[in-house]
Amino acid sequence: MGSESENVDVFTSLDDYLDHALVRKEIVGSWGFDASLDFTKMSVEENNIWFFEQVFNFLRSFFGVVMPDRLKIITYNARRQINRENLDQMTFLDELMLIMKNLNERIWVLKLDLSIVGFLRTDWDPDNPVRLRIQEPCSFIVWGGPDETGFQTFSIGYKLFSSQKIESEDIELWSMNQPILEKVLRKWEMQSGRKINTVKGNSSDLPLYEYGFSRPAPADIRPQEKKEGPQEDNIPDIDDLNL
């Protein structure tokens, strides 16, 4: 499903994104790096191909850990906004390439909302974990264009890295998930040829370091409770997994 919007909604920087996340009661950590590029020397096509390459590198590095859900592209000076939802992992890169072929403006911001791939052991069949798409705050954002230098960041909510334990296995979520996060962040560095040099969060209680969470995040760092009402989708939240 695709659309374009005249009312452009854009994050102008990582700090802007983190502030907006906090307003939504989402506590996240972010890891990123700057490409230090001069986009004024690039053509429109070169500018947009660079964005495609960053998405490709990221998805290749995080394959099997995250899946694309929603895409937002903002063109230079916020002239145009392109939205895509209900993305198919198998065809997403083809769809993105088609968008870029039909785009005669420079991309300024590309935001990819992600779902997290998880596995849940059940009491009735513990040897065959059920594959889930977990909806937690998780995104990949890239900034580029004449006024930018090519910064990109991956952000994820803290809940999967907390001291909360899985009852059936008596193990902290952090112990299970931090090694996976470190592995994919290191893969991302290798795939992109850049070192992570920006690590930020929107809570001083988050124990962040270059490759994830240095220790379990306190389980009581909680966003405000969601208001009751109809849900937008049926993708499970981490709180739905009977931890």
Image: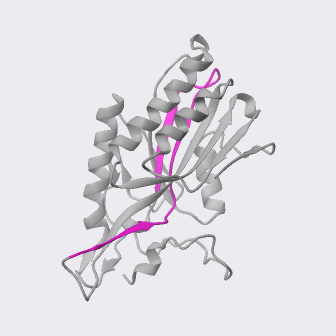
The correct choice, above or below, for 103 with respect to 204 in the image is above
The correct choice, above or below, for 41 with respect to 15 in the image is above
The correct choice, above or below, for 159 with respect to 1 in the image is below
Residue in the foreground of this view, choosing between 55 and 172: 55
Q: Quadrant of the C terminus?
A: bottom left
**Residue farthest toward the right in the current orientation of the protein:** 6
Visible residue check, residue 140 = yes
Residue 181: x and y, percent?
Answer: 32, 53
Residue in the foreground of this view, choosing between 230 and 23: 230
Residue at point 31%, 56% (across, down) = 214
Q: Is residue 71 left or right of residue 174?
A: right
Q: Which residues are magenta?
A: 128-156
Residue at point 49%, 38% (across, down) = 94
* Residue 135 falls within the magenta-colored stretch: yes
Residue 90: x and y, percent?
Answer: 42, 48
* Residue 200 falls within the magenta-colored stretch: no
Residue at point 42%, 60% (across, down) = 116
**Residue farthest toward the left in the current orientation of the protein:** 127
Q: Is residue 118 left or right of residue 109?
A: left
**Residue farthest toward the top in the current orientation of the protein:** 41
Residue in the foreground of this view, choosing between 62 and 38: 62
Residue 111: x and y, percent?
Answer: 57, 44
Q: How is the image coloured?
A: one colour
Residue at point 26%, 74% (across, down) = 129
Residue 93: x and y, percent?
Answer: 47, 39
The image quadrant of residue 119 is: bottom left
